[in-house]
Amino acid sequence: MIERLDLQYFKCFEELKLPLSQLTLLSGSNAAGKSSVIQALNLLHQTISNHEWSNRLLLNGNIVNAGTVQDVVDKVNGRRGFQIGLITEEHSFQWSFSGEREDMSVTVDFVTVDGEVSNSPEKLHFLLPDDSSSVTKDMANRLYSMTYISAERIGPRDYYLLDDLQNVPVVGSTGENTVSLLYSRQDDEVLPEMVEPTVSSKLFQQVQFRMQQFFPGCEIVVERVSAINAVTLGIRTSEDTGFHRPMHVGFGLTQILPIVVAALAAKKDDLLIIENPEVHLHPAGQSMMGQFLGTVASAGVQIIVETHSDHLLNGVRRAVKSRSLHPDKVNIHYFQPRDIEGSQVASPQIDVEGNISYWPKGFFDQYEMDMNYFAGWGE
């Protein structure tokens, strides 16, 4: 598990040392740095998944378009470079990058693994020294296999392209590979800790069960269209109807399916990053999503979530209180603009009863503020 992310002179951070856990929630006001944390991980993932032997970090690609050096370097304190560090249970990794202001990629100035520095490396494998050690292989694999699901997920389609698992090992940043992956891996075994025991432990049946929790009566069917290497997705929300094309059912189903498939298809120590999993979900569904992600994290999958939903937070709190997720496996971070007095990141703790240790101003307190207004107690 990655236990900490370090950033220096990256985007809005002069220096950040952010603790991570099995389930990490990132919340806060807009443009306060939540997305920058995710973007740092995405830049590493994007580069090593597209350029195995590169000694430059790719700022623009199929996952993230960060612009140029001047767009990613901290404008207040930085100059031409920045650093990204990852700390695991036993090892540490740090990259230092630099480039000219208009460059769309940056040079790796040095890589440090467990304190051993490789300066100006000419040959890197997955942005790490090509030493064939288990330490570098493990980190490279973790970043390569990372799953990122953005807030902008694709909508319903008449059909979905079917591809080999080597080309589409994850659901994709917009969920574009979800149905293809579900079809190809439908008979895979789900991690025992995530299995609902009343149905088969195979991926397809477990996905359908979870979808029924979010959308009662939901059933799905995936069929191959061999002539064009594609699959179709049929959905119904009642046994009294036939299966419909996705555009004829609630939009939320196709928005949640990528999250459910990615989570249930994950293996222990996989890294799953999700932006706004609550999108298009009813408040009860948002709470259920928090509980579901708690179950997945408790099974050994590392999850980082960016959210604006107090219902999702409360779902995580319920997972803790029900003892399905240990509080030590949860980190909560609230990001504030750097021009506000105090730390850029506040990190309230959660106890075994699901209580939050303190509520920073602006941390999911809008409901209370609005109710106070109606009661005449505040502005």
Image: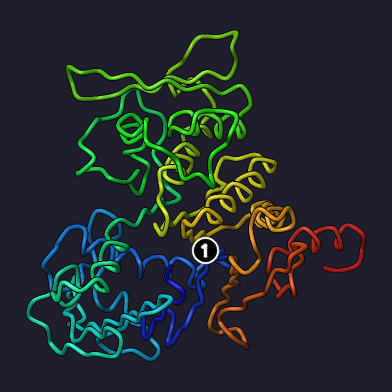
Question: Farthest residue toward the left?
Answer: 122
Q: Which element is circle 1 on?
A: loop
In the rendered view, would you say 286 is above or below 71?
A: above
Q: Residue at point 59% right, 53% down?
A: 294
Residue 207 or residue 259, whichever sits in front: 207
- Mark 1, residues whose alpha carbon is within 10 Å: few (<14), some, or many (≥20)? many
Relative depth, front residue between 316 and 1 = 1
* Residue 79 place in picture, x, y as percent: 28, 90
Where is residue 379? Give x, y as percent: 82, 68
- Which quarter of the figure has residue 197? top right
- Quadrant location of the N terminus? bottom left
Which of the 4 quarters of the picture holds residue 64?
bottom left
User: Would you place residue 377 above or below residue 184 in this image?
Assistant: below
- The answer to whether 122 is drawn above or below residue 262 in the figure is below
Left or right: where does residue 90 sit relative to residue 312? left
**Which residue is pictured at 7% across the width and 80% down the height?**
122
* Kind of residue at disc 1: Gln
Q: How is the image coloured?
A: rainbow
- The residue positioned 62% from the left and 51% from the top of the image is 290
Q: Which residue is mark 1?
A: 22
